[in-house]
Image (cartoon, rainbow, N blue to C red):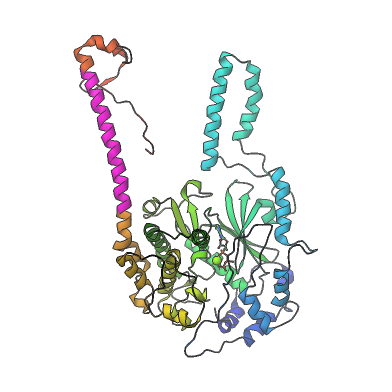
Amino acid sequence: MKWSEMASVNATQQHLNFSSSWEEDSSDNSFDEWTHKSVPLRSPCRTPRIQRHRNRSITVSPSVPTSPIPYAAWKKLRLCDSPSTPKSLLSKSTMPCSSSKTCRSQRFLRLSTAFERVPSVNINPFTPDTVRRNSEHYKRKSQRSDDDEDYGPRSKEIQNSSEDESFFLPSKRPAVSARMLSRYESEFLELACIGVGEFGSVYRCVKRLDGCMYAIKRSRRPIAGSANEQLALKEVYAHAVLGHHPHVVRYYSAWAEDDHMIIQNEYCDGGSLHDAITEKREQGEFFSVPELRDLLLQVSMGLKYIHNSGLVHLDIKPSNIFICRRSTLSAGGEGDSEEEDESHSSGVVYKIGDLGHVTSISSPQVEEGDSRFLAYEVLREDYTHLPKADIFALGLTVLLAAGASPLPQNGDDWHRLRQGELPNLPHELPALFKDLLKSLLDPDPTARPSATALCRHDVLCKERAGKLATQLRKELNVEKFRTAMLERELKEARLAATSPQQSCQPGSLPKAKRKLVGRNVARSVSFGFPGY
Ligand SMILES: Nc1ncnc2c1ncn2[C@@H]1O[C@H](COP(=O)(O)OP(=O)(O)OP(=O)(O)O)[C@@H](O)[C@H]1O
Ligand SMILES: [Mg+2]
C-alpha cells in the first residue's frame, strides 16, 4: 500500500484490541507525520527503489538471532526521529541479544530449555509418528505378555501396566490457565527460530495441548497504530477467508499479545523453497526438469485457489513457498481438493505462505511485494490484471529453482527481465517448458497464462500423466502377481481334487480345513504387497 493511501485508510483502519493504554494514546503520531512526509514522487519511467527484502528470510539458529534491518524501518528512520519512531526500534532490532536486557527470543528459549527437561506437552495419539510408536509398543507388549504367560511372574505385567497406560493416555494436561503466562508461553513450547522476515520472526513450536507442531509467526515490532497493523491484519484476514487448501499454508489462529501480532500456522517441515534452492546451489545442483514442472504445477494450484477466491498474493517468491514432506505432516494433514492426490507423488508438497501482501482483485489495496519479483505493470500502478502479477513472480521463482542467478532489485537487468528476456540458466530447458516459462514473464499481462490454464497445461499435465502411468504400471504388476498366485492355487486345488492322498503331504493343508469356494477352488489367501 502506498503511504498516501495508507493515510486515508488510517482514518478508518481497524485497530487490534491490544491494550487500553494504546487505544487512548494519541502520543504516537509518528505514523501520521511519516505518512504526510513520505508521499513518493514518481518518475515516468520508474525503477524500483525497494531494497526491502535484502537479507530477508534467513533461517537462523535460535542462539544467533539475526535482525536484518527492515526496509520500512529504514524509511521511517529517514523521515522522523522521535524516541518512539523506528530509530529506537531499529536500534532495538539490531541490538545483540547478549546485551544486558534479555531479548524476547532468548527469554523463550530459556523457558523452553527448562521445559525440555520436564516436557509439559501432551502427546497426540493420532499423529503418524505416535501411531507408529504405539503399534511398536503394542507389539512389544504382546510379546512380553506371551513370554510372561509362559515363564514370568504375573507381578511383572502388573508393574508394567501403569507404564503402558501412561504411554497411551495423554500425559497430564499442563495447567494452561493456572499460570499468568502469555498465551504463547502457556500454550506453546518453543523449539527453534526457523525464520526471520520483514514482518517478524517465525518459531517452530509444539502446542502443549495437542502435541502437534506449528509455525508461530510473531511480529518483530509493536504493531498498534503502525502500518504493520494493517499488514498483520491483512495476513490474518486472508488466511481466515481462504480456509484450507493443500497448496496454501494452513492457518489455525491469531491473537495479539504484548502489542505484537502472533499467527499460528501449519508447520512445514521442509523449510522454504528459498532454503531448498540455496542448499542445492551450494552443492552445485539445481532442480531437475520434472521437479520444476512439479513445483510450477503445485504452486499454480495454490494460486488458482487464491485467485478463484477473489484474492491475489502479490509476494510470490521462493522464501514464501514452503515445503512439506508428506510422511511427516505435522498438524491437520491435507485439505480436500480434487487435485490433491495427483500432486503428491513426488513426496513433496509446496505451499504458498506469507499472506501479508494479499489483497482483493476487485478493490485492490496494493502493498508492493519484493521488487525482485515485481511485475512492471504493478510498478506502473496498473492493477487491472493483478493475478497475472502473481504469475510473473511464479515464473521468476521457477527460473531461480532452475539455477538462474540471484535476481536484480532494479536497474537495466531488472528492466530486461520485464521485456521478455529470460535469465541465463546453467542447463538448457526443454523447448516447450522454456516457452511456457517465457509466457509467464510476458511483458503483456494478458498474454500470461492464468493459474487455471497452468493447472491444465499440457507441458505440466504430461508430467502428471507420466506419474499416473507409473502408478498404473505398478498396479498392473500387482495384479499380474495376484493372478499368478491364484493360478498356482487353482492348480494345487485341482491336483488335490484328483489325487486326495497328496493333500496330506507335508506343506499342504489337510483337505477338511481348506475352505473351498465356487467350483472347489480354494479361497485365495490374502497376501501383502508393499504399498498396497
Ligand atoms: N509455516 C512455516 N513452516 C516452516 N517455515 C516457515 C513457516 N512460516 C515461515 N517460515 C520460515 O520463516 C521465514 C519467514 O516467514 P514469512 O515469510 O511468513 O515471514 P515474513 O516476516 O513475512 O517474511 P518476509 O517479509 O521476508 O517475506 C520463511 O521464509 C520460512 O523460512
Ligand atoms: Mg515472507
Q: Residue at x 26, y 35 (%)?
A: 480
Relative to 249, say whether 377 is above or below.
below
How far across and down, in percent of the image, does residue 323 sit? 49, 56
Prevailing secondary structure of the magenta residues = helix
Magenta-drawn segment: 466-494
Determine whether, in the image, residue 487 is placed left or right of residue 193: left
The quadrant of the rendering that contains the N terminus is bottom right
Residue 214 percent across, percent down from the top left: 58, 53
Residue 177 is at least partly visible in this image: no
Magenta region includes residue 486: yes
Horizontal arrangement in the rendering, residue 140 relative to residue 360 (left or right): right
Drawn side of residue 487 relative to residue 24, left or right? left
Q: On screen, 116 above or below 525? A: below
Question: Looking at the rendering, in which quadrant would you find the C terminus?
Answer: top left
Figure quadrant of residue 57: bottom right
Question: Which quadrant of the frame does ligand 2 lie within?
Answer: bottom right
In this image, 467 relative to 351: left or right? left
